[in-house]
Image (cartoon, grey):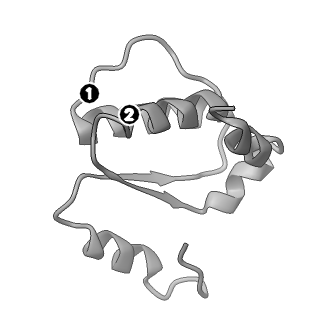
Amino acid sequence: MLIGRRRVGKTTLTLQKYSDDAVIYLFVSKKDEHLLCEEFMEQISSKLDVKIFGNISKFKELFKYILELGKSKKFTLIIDEFQELSKINPSIYSNIQNIGI
Protein backbone atom coordinates (compact mmCIF):
# COMPACT_ATOMS: atom_id res chain seq x y z
CA MET A 1 0.00 0.00 0.00
CA LEU A 2 1.28 3.44 -0.90
CA ILE A 3 -0.28 6.50 0.69
CA GLY A 4 0.63 10.15 0.32
CA ARG A 5 -0.52 13.60 -0.66
CA ARG A 6 -2.00 14.18 -4.08
CA ARG A 7 0.22 14.94 -7.08
CA VAL A 8 3.56 13.97 -5.50
CA GLY A 9 4.40 11.09 -7.88
CA LYS A 10 3.13 7.95 -6.13
CA THR A 11 1.88 6.39 -9.35
CA THR A 12 5.04 7.24 -11.29
CA LEU A 13 7.22 5.84 -8.52
CA THR A 14 5.22 2.63 -8.37
CA LEU A 15 5.16 2.08 -12.13
CA GLN A 16 8.88 2.82 -12.38
CA LYS A 17 9.65 0.24 -9.68
CA TYR A 18 7.84 -2.49 -11.60
CA SER A 19 8.73 -1.39 -15.14
CA ASP A 20 10.49 -4.68 -15.99
CA ASP A 21 7.72 -6.91 -14.64
CA ALA A 22 4.30 -7.92 -15.90
CA VAL A 23 2.11 -5.21 -14.41
CA ILE A 24 -1.63 -4.73 -14.46
CA TYR A 25 -2.36 -1.07 -13.69
CA LEU A 26 -6.01 -0.37 -12.96
CA PHE A 27 -7.17 3.19 -12.41
CA VAL A 28 -10.52 3.41 -10.63
CA SER A 29 -12.37 6.26 -12.31
CA LYS A 30 -15.89 7.37 -11.48
CA LYS A 31 -17.80 5.09 -13.85
CA ASP A 32 -20.39 2.37 -13.58
CA GLU A 33 -19.15 -0.94 -12.24
CA HIS A 34 -19.74 -2.82 -15.49
CA LEU A 35 -17.86 -0.19 -17.54
CA LEU A 36 -14.87 -0.34 -15.21
CA CYS A 37 -14.89 -4.12 -15.33
CA GLU A 38 -14.82 -3.97 -19.14
CA GLU A 39 -11.86 -1.58 -19.07
CA PHE A 40 -10.04 -3.67 -16.47
CA MET A 41 -10.57 -6.89 -18.42
CA GLU A 42 -9.14 -5.23 -21.54
CA GLN A 43 -6.06 -4.21 -19.51
CA ILE A 44 -5.64 -7.71 -18.13
CA SER A 45 -6.03 -9.27 -21.56
CA SER A 46 -3.51 -6.99 -23.24
CA LYS A 47 -0.88 -6.87 -20.47
CA LEU A 48 -0.85 -10.59 -19.71
CA ASP A 49 -1.67 -11.78 -23.23
CA VAL A 50 -4.63 -13.88 -22.11
CA LYS A 51 -7.86 -14.59 -23.94
CA ILE A 52 -10.96 -13.76 -21.97
CA PHE A 53 -14.14 -15.68 -22.65
CA GLY A 54 -17.44 -14.44 -21.36
CA ASN A 55 -18.33 -11.17 -19.75
CA ILE A 56 -17.36 -9.92 -16.30
CA SER A 57 -19.48 -7.05 -15.05
CA LYS A 58 -19.07 -7.13 -11.25
CA PHE A 59 -16.02 -6.34 -9.13
CA LYS A 60 -16.47 -9.56 -7.17
CA GLU A 61 -16.19 -11.60 -10.39
CA LEU A 62 -13.25 -9.49 -11.54
CA PHE A 63 -11.21 -10.01 -8.37
CA LYS A 64 -12.04 -13.71 -8.34
CA TYR A 65 -10.73 -13.93 -11.92
CA ILE A 66 -7.57 -12.01 -11.00
CA LEU A 67 -6.89 -14.38 -8.08
CA GLU A 68 -7.39 -17.42 -10.31
CA LEU A 69 -5.12 -15.90 -12.96
CA GLY A 70 -2.45 -15.40 -10.33
CA LYS A 71 -2.21 -19.17 -9.88
CA SER A 72 -0.83 -19.60 -13.39
CA LYS A 73 0.80 -16.25 -14.23
CA LYS A 74 3.19 -14.02 -12.32
CA PHE A 75 2.23 -10.33 -12.31
CA THR A 76 1.97 -7.26 -10.12
CA LEU A 77 -1.45 -5.70 -9.61
CA ILE A 78 -1.57 -1.94 -9.04
CA ILE A 79 -4.94 -0.37 -8.25
CA ASP A 80 -4.85 3.42 -8.31
CA GLU A 81 -7.58 5.18 -6.29
CA PHE A 82 -8.60 1.88 -4.68
CA GLN A 83 -10.82 3.68 -2.17
CA GLU A 84 -13.10 4.79 -5.02
CA LEU A 85 -14.25 1.18 -5.48
CA SER A 86 -16.43 1.47 -2.37
CA LYS A 87 -18.20 4.53 -3.76
CA ILE A 88 -19.13 2.55 -6.85
CA ASN A 89 -20.03 -0.66 -5.01
CA PRO A 90 -20.29 -0.32 -1.21
CA SER A 91 -20.03 -4.10 -0.70
CA ILE A 92 -16.70 -4.44 -2.54
CA TYR A 93 -14.53 -4.87 0.57
CA SER A 94 -16.65 -7.67 2.03
CA ASN A 95 -16.92 -9.27 -1.42
CA ILE A 96 -13.13 -9.32 -1.78
CA GLN A 97 -12.78 -10.65 1.76
CA ASN A 98 -15.18 -13.53 1.00
CA ILE A 99 -13.65 -14.64 -2.29
CA GLY A 100 -12.52 -18.21 -2.01
CA ILE A 101 -14.50 -19.05 1.11
Location of the C terminus (image quadrant): top right
Q: Nearer the viewer, residue 75 or 31?
A: 75
User: Quick check: marks 2 and 1 in contact, CB under 8 Å?
Assistant: yes
Image coordinates of residue 40 in percent, x first then y, are 46, 38
Q: Can you tell which of label 2 and label 1 is closer to the viewer?
A: 2
Mark 2 / mark 1, whichever is N-terminal:
1
Hey, what amino acid is under mark 2?
A: Leu
Hey, what amino acid is under mark 1?
A: Val
Residue 43 as seen in the image, left or right of residue 30:
left
The answer to which quarter of the image holds residue 20 is: bottom left
Q: Residue at x 27, y 68 (%)?
A: 18
Residue 79 as seen in the image, left or right of residue 88:
left
Q: Secondary structure at mark 1?
A: loop
Residue furthest out toward the right: 90
Residue furthest out toward the left: 20
Crowding at label 2, few (<14), some or many (≥20) Cα neighbours within 10 Å?
some
Q: Secondary structure at mark 2?
A: helix
Crowding at label 1, few (<14), some or many (≥20) Cα neighbours within 10 Å?
few
Location of the N terminus (image quadrant): bottom right
Query: Is 82 drawn above or below residue 66 in the view shown?
Result: below
- From the image, tell me which residue sits under label 2: 69
Query: Is 49 drawn above or below residue 89 in the view shown?
Result: above
Image coordinates of residue 7 in percent, x first then y, are 52, 84
Residue furthest out toward the top: 54
- From the image, tell me which residue sits under label 1: 50
Report, in whole angstroms, how far the alpha carbon at label 2 lies from the one at label 1: 9 Å
